Amino acid sequence: MANRNDLMEQRVVELEQRVGGFGELFDAVDKRFDGVDRRLDAIDKRFDEVDLRFVAIDKRFDTVENRLDTMDRKFDELPTKSDLKVFMEEMASQVKTAAEGYGATLDSIDRSIQLMSTQITTKDRDRDLVLKDLGKRISALERR
Protein backbone atom coordinates (compact mmCIF):
# COMPACT_ATOMS: atom_id res chain seq x y z
CA MET A 1 0.00 0.00 0.00
CA ALA A 2 2.86 2.20 0.51
CA ASN A 3 3.55 1.86 -3.12
CA ARG A 4 0.06 2.68 -3.87
CA ASN A 5 0.09 5.71 -1.62
CA ASP A 6 3.39 6.77 -3.05
CA LEU A 7 2.06 6.31 -6.51
CA MET A 8 -1.07 8.25 -5.66
CA GLU A 9 0.93 10.93 -4.02
CA GLN A 10 3.16 11.12 -7.04
CA ARG A 11 0.12 11.44 -9.27
CA VAL A 12 -1.33 14.16 -7.04
CA VAL A 13 1.98 16.05 -7.28
CA GLU A 14 1.99 15.66 -11.04
CA LEU A 15 -1.60 16.84 -11.17
CA GLU A 16 -0.73 19.80 -8.96
CA GLN A 17 2.14 20.66 -11.29
CA ARG A 18 -0.10 20.38 -14.28
CA VAL A 19 -2.82 22.38 -12.59
CA GLY A 20 -0.22 24.90 -11.44
CA GLY A 21 0.89 25.17 -15.08
CA PHE A 22 -2.68 25.68 -16.06
CA GLY A 23 -2.95 28.39 -13.43
CA GLU A 24 0.01 30.17 -15.01
CA LEU A 25 -1.62 29.73 -18.40
CA PHE A 26 -4.92 31.00 -17.01
CA ASP A 27 -3.08 33.97 -15.50
CA ALA A 28 -1.45 34.69 -18.89
CA VAL A 29 -4.83 34.36 -20.65
CA ASP A 30 -6.42 36.54 -17.96
CA LYS A 31 -3.73 39.19 -18.51
CA ARG A 32 -4.37 39.02 -22.24
CA PHE A 33 -8.12 39.38 -21.65
CA ASP A 34 -7.40 42.36 -19.37
CA GLY A 35 -5.33 43.92 -22.17
CA VAL A 36 -8.09 43.21 -24.68
CA ASP A 37 -10.64 44.62 -22.23
CA ARG A 38 -8.59 47.84 -21.86
CA ARG A 39 -8.29 48.09 -25.62
CA LEU A 40 -12.04 47.57 -26.03
CA ASP A 41 -12.67 50.24 -23.37
CA ALA A 42 -10.41 52.63 -25.31
CA ILE A 43 -12.24 51.76 -28.54
CA ASP A 44 -15.57 52.24 -26.75
CA LYS A 45 -14.43 55.70 -25.60
CA ARG A 46 -13.42 56.51 -29.16
CA PHE A 47 -16.82 55.38 -30.41
CA ASP A 48 -18.46 57.55 -27.76
CA GLU A 49 -16.39 60.53 -28.95
CA VAL A 50 -17.26 59.75 -32.56
CA ASP A 51 -20.91 59.44 -31.56
CA LEU A 52 -20.75 62.87 -29.89
CA ARG A 53 -19.17 64.28 -33.03
CA PHE A 54 -21.93 62.75 -35.13
CA VAL A 55 -24.54 64.27 -32.81
CA ALA A 56 -22.86 67.69 -33.21
CA ILE A 57 -22.70 67.24 -37.00
CA ASP A 58 -26.36 66.18 -37.01
CA LYS A 59 -27.27 69.34 -35.10
CA ARG A 60 -25.30 71.43 -37.59
CA PHE A 61 -27.08 69.74 -40.48
CA ASP A 62 -30.43 70.43 -38.79
CA THR A 63 -29.45 74.09 -38.40
CA VAL A 64 -28.34 74.30 -42.04
CA GLU A 65 -31.52 72.55 -43.14
CA ASN A 66 -33.65 75.01 -41.16
CA ARG A 67 -31.76 77.93 -42.67
CA LEU A 68 -32.23 76.52 -46.15
CA ASP A 69 -35.95 76.03 -45.50
CA THR A 70 -36.20 79.63 -44.29
CA MET A 71 -34.30 80.91 -47.31
CA ASP A 72 -36.47 78.78 -49.60
CA ARG A 73 -39.62 80.28 -48.08
CA LYS A 74 -38.20 83.79 -48.41
CA PHE A 75 -37.21 83.05 -51.99
CA ASP A 76 -40.74 81.83 -52.71
CA GLU A 77 -42.08 85.11 -51.31
CA LEU A 78 -39.98 87.18 -53.72
CA PRO A 79 -41.91 88.51 -56.70
CA THR A 80 -41.38 86.72 -59.97
CA LYS A 81 -40.35 88.40 -63.18
CA SER A 82 -43.94 88.37 -64.39
CA ASP A 83 -45.11 89.87 -61.07
CA LEU A 84 -42.59 92.68 -61.47
CA LYS A 85 -43.66 93.21 -65.07
CA VAL A 86 -47.32 93.51 -64.03
CA PHE A 87 -46.31 95.91 -61.24
CA MET A 88 -44.30 98.05 -63.68
CA GLU A 89 -47.22 98.14 -66.13
CA GLU A 90 -49.58 99.22 -63.34
CA MET A 91 -47.13 101.92 -62.25
CA ALA A 92 -46.77 103.12 -65.86
CA SER A 93 -50.55 103.26 -66.17
CA GLN A 94 -50.88 105.22 -62.92
CA VAL A 95 -48.10 107.63 -63.93
CA LYS A 96 -49.76 108.13 -67.34
CA THR A 97 -53.13 108.78 -65.70
CA ALA A 98 -51.55 111.24 -63.25
CA ALA A 99 -49.71 113.00 -66.07
CA GLU A 100 -52.90 113.27 -68.10
CA GLY A 101 -54.68 114.67 -65.04
CA TYR A 102 -51.91 117.20 -64.48
CA GLY A 103 -52.02 118.08 -68.18
CA ALA A 104 -55.78 118.63 -68.03
CA THR A 105 -55.37 120.72 -64.88
CA LEU A 106 -52.67 122.84 -66.52
CA ASP A 107 -54.85 123.27 -69.63
CA SER A 108 -57.75 124.38 -67.41
CA ILE A 109 -55.48 126.85 -65.59
CA ASP A 110 -54.22 128.14 -68.94
CA ARG A 111 -57.80 128.67 -70.19
CA SER A 112 -58.70 130.46 -66.95
CA ILE A 113 -55.68 132.74 -67.26
CA GLN A 114 -56.54 133.50 -70.89
CA LEU A 115 -60.13 134.30 -69.91
CA MET A 116 -58.92 136.56 -67.09
CA SER A 117 -56.47 138.22 -69.46
CA THR A 118 -59.24 138.83 -71.97
CA GLN A 119 -61.48 140.24 -69.25
CA ILE A 120 -58.71 142.51 -67.94
CA THR A 121 -57.91 143.70 -71.45
CA THR A 122 -61.58 144.43 -72.07
CA LYS A 123 -61.87 146.30 -68.78
CA ASP A 124 -58.71 148.28 -69.54
CA ARG A 125 -60.11 149.26 -72.93
CA ASP A 126 -63.46 150.21 -71.40
CA ARG A 127 -61.68 152.26 -68.70
CA ASP A 128 -59.50 153.93 -71.31
CA LEU A 129 -62.59 154.77 -73.41
CA VAL A 130 -64.39 156.09 -70.33
CA LEU A 131 -61.37 158.20 -69.36
CA LYS A 132 -61.09 159.53 -72.92
CA ASP A 133 -64.77 160.34 -72.98
CA LEU A 134 -64.51 162.02 -69.57
CA GLY A 135 -61.47 163.95 -70.78
CA LYS A 136 -63.40 165.18 -73.81
CA ARG A 137 -66.38 166.18 -71.65
CA ILE A 138 -64.16 168.00 -69.17
CA SER A 139 -62.44 169.83 -72.08
CA ALA A 140 -65.83 170.70 -73.58
CA LEU A 141 -67.03 172.00 -70.21
CA GLU A 142 -63.91 174.05 -69.72
CA ARG A 143 -64.35 175.70 -73.14
CA ARG A 144 -67.73 176.99 -72.34
Image (cartoon, rainbow, N blue to C red):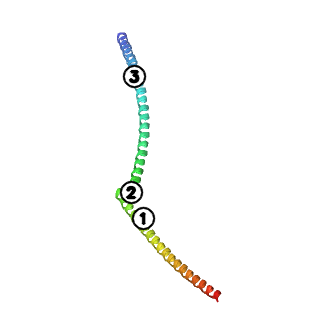
N-terminal of the two: label 2 or label 1? Answer: 2
Where is residue 14 drawn, in percent x and y? 36, 13
Residue nearer the viewer, 37 or 97: 97
Mark 3 or 1 closer to N-term? 3
- Circle 3 sits on which residue? 32
**Three-letter code, disc 3:** Arg
The disc placed on residue 79 is: 2
- Report whether 97 appears left or right of 143: left
Q: Residue at x 42, y 51 (%)?
A: 70
Amino acid carrying mark 2 in the image: Pro
| Relative image position of residue 16 (x, y in whole percent) | 39, 16
Residue under pointer 1: 95
> Image point 65% across, 86% down: which residue?
142
Asked if residue 141 lies left or right of residue 100, the reply is right
Q: CA distance from mark 2 to mark 1?
A: 21 Å
CA neighbours of label 3 inside 10 A, class few (<14), some (14 to 19), many (20+): few
